[in-house]
Image: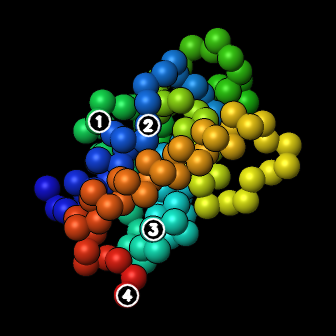
Amino acid sequence: MKSERLFLKRFVSSFYEESRRVRTPKNASPVITQSINELFKKYFGLKYEFENEEVEKAFKNCGFEIMGVKKEEIPREFWEPGNHLFAAFQKFINIKSLTSVNLSHTWKKHKPNYSEEKVTEIEMLRVRLDQFWNENKNLMVNHIKR
């Protein structure tokens, strides 16, 4: 396995947690890929961008299912709670939906309406990101901004 793919796999296994299936457009694989790339660009200073296929493979290797996006339009009923999965859209991400949101908040300023618990949670996540980076940065040595 290439070092950057191993880095991504470790990242996914460290920061995403299993939960009930949540069906929202925000959990589509291109959105998750964009979020991870933005996080790496803004937080880690990486110029390397992961491809959608790499991110999907990393989630799969960690035991997650990730929802793909088809070219055809998704019917509105698809997103309604309790709806059965359509045959064409059976790949869903199975994570805590707030994990991605909190990760993105680690490089943004805290909003004034955040509770103390939310601010603490984001700060702890920032500490975990620092620790993760220090332990795994050697895997991305060829892609770190100089």
Number of the front mark, 4 or 2: 4
Query: Label for residue 44?
Result: 3
Give how far across and how far down residue 29 sits, in percent. Answer: 48, 46
Q: Residue at x 43, y 41 (%)?
A: 15
Q: Earlier in the sequence, mark 2 or mark 3?
A: 2
- Marks 3 and 1: in contact by CB < 8 Å? no
Q: Earlier in the sequence, mark 4 or mark 3?
A: 3
| Disc 1 crowd, CA 10 A, few/some/many (<14, 14-19, 20+) | some
Q: Earlier in the sequence, mark 2 or mark 1?
A: 2
Residue 144 visible in the snapshot: yes
In the rendered structure, which amino acid carries the disc numbered 3? Phe
Secondary structure under tag 1 reads loop
Secondary structure under tag 4 reads loop
In the rendered structure, which amino acid carries the disc numbered 4? Arg
Q: Disc 2 designates what residue?
A: 16
| Front in this rendered view, residue 60 or 9 | 9
Q: Disc 4 designates what residue?
A: 146
